Image: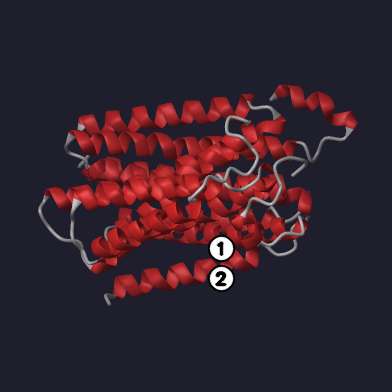
Amino acid sequence: MSTLDTVIRLVYLAAAVCFVIGLHLMNSPRTARRGNTVSAAGMVAAALATLVLLVDSGAVSATGWLVLLCGAAVGAGAGWYFARTVAMTAMPQLVSLFNAVGGGAAGLIAVHDFTRVAAGGGALPARVAVPTVLDIVIGAVTLAGSVVASGKLQGVVASRPLVFPGARAVNATLALVMIAAGGYLATGAANVTVLVVLAVAATAFGVTMVLPIGGADMPVVISLLNAFTGTAVAMAGFVIGNTVLIIAGALVGASGGILTKLMADAMNRSIANIIVGGFGTSDGPA
Amino acid sequence: MTPELLADLSIFLLSLLVGFEVISKVPATLHTPLMSAANSIHGIVLVGAMLIAVTADNLLGYVLGFVAAAFATMNVVGGYVVTNRMLAMFRAPAAKQPAEEER
């Protein structure tokens, strides 16, 4: 391991520590802002370290840089603009939207890795294939689910529980398709068609999962999907072998899960109760 | 099982336990900001998005890299800014109201 490599890994470790401390400081209103700053500092450090790593590797083509920088500029601009201009009351749906794109990015990392292996005609080792499948499934479910959740809060999608006839059968079918396709890919077969089937089924499942849930329960659902994204990011970390992704992802997955339970408790509801949904919870204060 | 995978699994499990412990007695008013903070932290996927850009060498790779980079930066930048705005409401007794304007 070269010196630079060591330094970068240490920066990643420091970033992970910042995330834990930042999250901990969020437990009290007095220290919450500091917590957010600490966590943001960790994020900036990790991103800069990665940038140094890329520059040093010299392996990135001019097109690669252009693509990366344009993508980052578009994302940063959109994120900044929406976050600054959104009305205070519309913040939960915006968080849900940011959560959706985070899940999407995590899923895309696995897709990218997968297509590269598939193009080379190789097979994936089990230690990559399993997290790849999980990443794509969780990422796609979160992406679609969070967009629907956001739409429900914004009023673009009806906030009342939307239950259509045969919804249960559709969900069961989608689940079976995901298990079959996912199981096949987990064996290491690099088949792009099956991957597309898996991604489409997971996306549809994300939509049908959130549609029957009432608008008043959305904050809890968004928190749950947030925990999902954390898990997807951790899986992406396994796919590309990056520790900081695993740490931060697992951290968010677990804390998001606990937070979801706390939020459900505060509303006197159980998470299972909310997910099954459709109990005349269409509107009212969340 | 390779040593690398074992190390990664250990890190994963221990981080899960830290995640469970770090959220303990959070007051209900902080639920939404905390959710938003956790949302920004999984923006670390940006590091992954940057790393996959290295290996892209065809159109599909570039498209995936572009979208992943855009998504991830939006998650990071938007996440932290919106969390900060939410938290700004907490230190806002009437006297400090004008301070809101500078943002």
Residue at the left extreme? A121
How is colour applied across the structure in the image?
secondary structure
Q: Seen in the image, is A104 located left or right of residue A268?
A: left
Please state which of residues A60 and A222 is positioned toward the viewer in this rendering.
Answer: A222
Q: How many marks?
A: 2
Q: Residue at x 44, y 69 (%)?
A: B11
Q: Which kind of residue does numbered mark 1 sit on?
A: Ala
Give the x, y percent position of residue A100: 49, 42
Labels 1 and 2 share a subunit: no
Residue B41 image position (x, y, % from top left) = 53, 49
From mark 1 to mark 2, how far is it between C-alphas? 7 Å
Indicate which disc residue B17 carries.
Answer: 2
- Left or right: residue A159 versus residue A125 is right
Graded by Cα atoms within 10 Å as few (under 14), some (14 to 19) or many (20 or more), the crowding at tag 2 reads: some
- Quadrant in the picture for the N terminus of chain A: bottom left
Q: Quadrant of residue A92?
A: top right
Whether residue A82 is visible here, answered yes or no, is yes
- Looking at the rendered structure, the kind of residue marked 2 is Leu
x, y percent for residue A9: 38, 57
Horizontal side of residue B7 vs A125, given as left or right = right
The residue wearing badge 1 is A254
Label 2 marks which chain's residue?
B
A219 or A59, which lies in front? A219
Dot 2: what SS? Answer: helix
Query: Horizontal placement of A156 versus B33: left or right?
Result: left
Determine whether label 1 and label 2 are within 8 Å by CB: yes
Name which residue lies at 64% across and 38% down.
Answer: A159
Residue at figure coordinates x 63%, y 49% from the top left: B35
